[in-house]
Amino acid sequence: MSHGRCATELEAIHQDILRMGTLVEEAIFDADRALSGQELLLAQKVIDGDDAIDDLEREIEAACVKLLALRRPLACDLRAVTTVFKVITDLERMGDHAHDIAAIAQRIGADRLIKPLIDIPRMSTLARQMVHESLDAFVRRDVALAQKVCKDDEPIDRLYTELYDELLLFIMQGNDTVRAGQALSLLFAARALERIADHATNIAERVIYLVTGTRVVRDHPSSTEL
């Protein structure tokens, strides 16, 4: 089959990836709102909506397999197709992390929050921007934008580390198991957002490799683990 036909089918796959990305961005936004505003119905919406993200991953994967089997794409397209497999895996995992945040919102329920949630919404906003820009960079083959996304991971790591230190104090006090339990739940939510940013960075790094053939070597240490 012609290179033009492959390019057309790849463009259709890219549009599906953008649809999947939109669902992921919405899930992150709604999960943050559900947690910060203690909106339990919204949390359930995020949990229920995870199936749509999973379904799109399977559809895109099937389209890529068909393209590889029937169209015999050229080497440059082959690298693009194999990159798609990795991108949709990252997106699916982002959706799982949004699901986890929504589940945490449900677990906390209507209990009074132990602190105003400021850093978590900030992390959510930055993470969603990274997701959006990483996919934009992928579709446009924009190395400069991909490099920006990689740099944007650092502020989220800093916010996570600061929040980790703050919430760890609630846990170490040990005289209030309810407060300690909620602090641990909030830490898991922050960790989920930090992981979403890492997945967006993965996509950006793959864009750089796709365009330049050069793999990015991360020079910063892993963030604090729970």
Image (cartoon, rainbow, N blue to C red):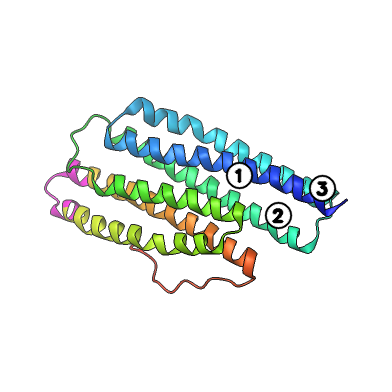
Where residue 39 sits in the image (x, y, percent)?
31, 28
Name the residue: 72% across, 43% down. Answer: 62
Amino acid type, label 2 = Val
Where residue 216 sits in the image (x, y, percent)?
53, 71
Mark in front: 1 vs 3: 3
Alpha carbons under labels 1 and 3: distance apart: 19 Å
Side (left or right) of 174 relative to 61: left
Task: Tell me if mark 1 has few (under 14), some (14-19) or many (20+) residues whose alpha carbon lies within 10 angstroms of its own.
Answer: many
Magenta extent? 170-180
Alpha carbons under labels 3 and 2: distance apart: 14 Å
Residue wearing tag 2: 81
Amino acid type, label 3 = Arg
Where residue 17 is drawn, which disc sits there? 1
Q: Quadrant of residue 57?
A: top right
Which SS class for mark 2? helix
Q: Look at the picture and state if 47 lies above or below 139.
A: above
Which SS class for mark 3? helix
Where residue 173 is drawn, which disc sits there? none
- Tally of numbered discs: 3
Amino acid type, label 1 = Ile
Residue 162 lies within the magenta run: no
Alpha carbons under labels 1 and 2: distance apart: 12 Å
Task: Tell me the quarter of the image containing the C terminus.
Answer: bottom left
Where residue 5 is drawn, which disc sits there? 3
Q: Look at the picture and state if 217 lies above or below 111.
A: below
Q: Look at the picture and state if 213 lies above or below 93.
A: below
